[in-house]
Amino acid sequence: APAIDAPVVDSDMNKPLLHECGDNQNYRKNGVPEQTCDWVGKLQGRRERLCAWPEARENCPQSCRLCCGDDKSFTIVINRDDIQKRCGWIGKNARRRERYCKTVNSGALVENRCGESCRSCPWPIPSQQPSSTTSSHPTATSKPSSL
């Protein structure tokens, strides 16, 4: 599996590939039963705070939005009859994406578990590797780079 902070890159397109990514379903922050990866990822502020720590990043790459894809085992409940649908069903229709992606369903923020189908993958995902090509415009920095 690729390292969490070094996404797989397609050399032709120079952007991270979508790949299966998922969280450790056994992870519990500080051993607290309710504090799963889904709990880490439900609220933006909590996600930003906790995902700054290596423990959360390593156990919850999908909830921390360090990788992007659809969790093949995740289903949402779409009505009172408990009809369940997978991520791909959401992604086939813009109205479904609008209705479900920003909601919590089946215990998780849907766009965290269905990143590809919800079209919520951050492009480009920042990599830890420097670019192999030079940019046409200089980048503003506070310090000059060293050679």
Image (cartoon, rainbow, N blue to C red):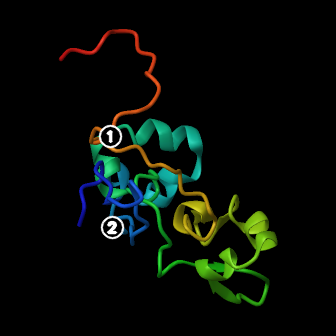
Q: What is the quadrant of residue 7 in the picture?
A: bottom left
In the rendered image, the quadrant that contains the C terminus is top left
Q: In which quarter of the image is residue 12?
A: bottom left
Position in image of residue 68 (x %, y %): 46, 62
Estimate the x, y position of residue 115 in percent, counting from the top left: 55, 64
Apparent side of residue 130 relative to residue 80 in the rendered image (left or right): left
Label 2: state its secondary structure: loop
For the point 36% across and 51% down, the residue is 29
Instruction: Please give the label number shown on residue 26.
Output: 2
* Nearer to us in this view, 136 or 54: 136
Q: Is residue 108 above or below residue 72?
A: above
Residue 87 in the image, given as x and y percentages of width and height: 60, 77
Q: Which amino acid does label 2 sit on?
A: Asn
Q: Nearer the viewer, residue 31 or 86?
A: 86
- Helix, strand or loop at label 1? It is loop
Residue beneath label 1, please? 133
Q: What residue is rendered at 41% in x and 15% in y?
A: 141
Q: Which quadrant is home to the N terminus?
A: bottom left
